Image: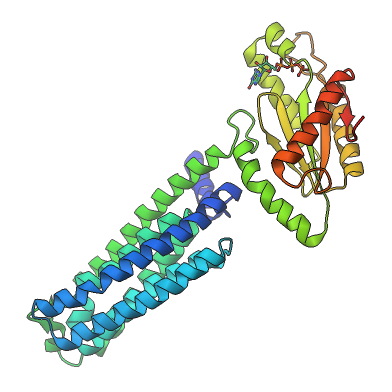
Amino acid sequence: MQALVRQIRDTLRLLFAQPDEVMREVGSGGELIAARVRAVIALLLLVLPLINAASGGSIRETMIGLGGAVFVNVFAQVWLALARRHRQHRWLPFASSAFDVTAATLVLAMLAMNHLPSGLNSMVVWCGYLLALVLTALRGDARVTLFAGGLALFEYSALAFVAIASATSPEQLISADYGAVTIGTQAQRVVLLAITTLITVMVTFRMQRVVEMSGTDGLTGLPNRVWLLHRVPRVMDTVQRDGSSLSLALIDLDHFKRVNDEAGHRAGDRALKHVVSILREGAEPGENLVRIGGQEFVLLMRKPIGSAWERVEHLRRQLLQRPFEPERGGEPFRLSLSAGIATYPQEGADLSRLLRRADQRLQEAKREGRNRVVARDG
Ligand SMILES: Nc1nc2c(ncn2[C@@H]2O[C@H](COP(=O)(O)OP(=O)(O)OP(=O)(O)O)[C@@H](O)[C@H]2O)c(=O)[nH]1
């Protein structure tokens, strides 16, 4: 029971968590795809009122449908322009999905004002909610889907309630074309919206987990190279804007092969976790530790190069003081690290140049006998 409660709590925490760097990148790309899909759907929507007219629908309904479709088309272009220009705006997916949901509600409300059953029993326009909810999955953020689902449930329930309450006679709720409006059919639609929201949230949630895993190292749980590639350009932008400092340390364990050779690969894995726990301990705000390869790590620090050197030097000494014990009674391994540090933007204007510079210094540290941190060219 406790395990179940914990699992539910963890799932809810993940569901409402801010998306990480990789996911945010996926989300902003998704917003642009959603905006493009919306523009295509909006064009297709122009055909629906014409089909309605051709199949003998009333002129008034056709005009309302056409007006709604033109309205959606104009805004679809606005959302497209915003998604192109403001890729990283966090409010954009919430605002655009609120628009999608509310556009369906507005068209239904206008139909209902003309003829109550056409607003409450129209299947075509009501499907606008389903399209809006499915579109939210492209943002890769379950919070957006939950928000849009909640809004659709609220708006449609309110519309149905107000429309049914405003009917002055039972005949107003019956139509030859649309059938009878009953509380039962409206409740079924609300339940269908809830089910669609739930399914879309689960699809988005799964997608979030898969993307998250692609940015996380399976052995140590640290962010990996994929994460680094997405994160660093953002950090560099911030550093340039606020004039702060950024240093990158490339850290490599010395003679790590020896651990594998002497104690076995599984002990090697445990040794890596041991190292990571030391490197992580006392991590300071603005620092990110990333595993970019087997026994190779990057430490990003919002510090000038001098303080960055002191920080990595401190970590080097910490590692030496806490040898790795492969198993109870086994001979402990004194692990050490070599590191090269480079600073942005003076020593590299982008990630690959910064890594190259840090790697040159790391190689120098190895050549000079390992177990040292190099932050200047020799
Ligand atoms: N157990 C374990 N070993 C790993 C992992 N990733 C890389 N290694 C090992 O790390 C070792 C790296 O060896 P080398 O590249 O020769 O470097 P080194 O022995 O650390 O020596 P220097 O870097 O020259 O100081 C290899 O034996 C790899 O098998 C891992 O995830 N688990």
Locate residue 164, reporting x and y percent: 24, 83
372 on left or right of 297: right
Q: Is residue 293 above or below residue 48?
A: above
Can residue 165 be seen here? The reply is yes
Question: What residue appears at the point 58 percent right and 64 percent down from the top-left corner?
Answer: 89
132 shown above or below 333 = below
Q: Report whether 100 appears left or right of 13.
A: left
Q: Position of residue 254 (x, y in %)?
A: 79, 19
Position of residue 291 in the picture relative to residue 58 (left or right): right
Residue 242: image quadrant is bottom right
Q: How many marks?
A: 0
Q: Residue furthest bottom?
A: 168
Specify whether residue 157 is in view. Answer: no
Give the color scheme: rainbow, by chain, secondary structure or one colour. rainbow
Please report the residue visible at 28 percent of the width from the left and 85 percent of the height from the top: 110
Which sits in the foreground, 123 or 346?
Answer: 346
- Name which residue lies at 30% across and 80% down: 68
Q: Residue furthest top?
A: 262
Q: What is the x, y in percent for residue 255?
A: 77, 15
From the viewer's perspective, tell me whether residue 72 is left or right of residue 123: right
Residue 108 percent location from the top left of the image: 27, 79
Query: Which residue shows up at 25% across the image and 81% down it?
Result: 66
The quadrant in which residue 138 appears is bottom left
Of the 4 image quadrants, the one containing the C terminus is top right
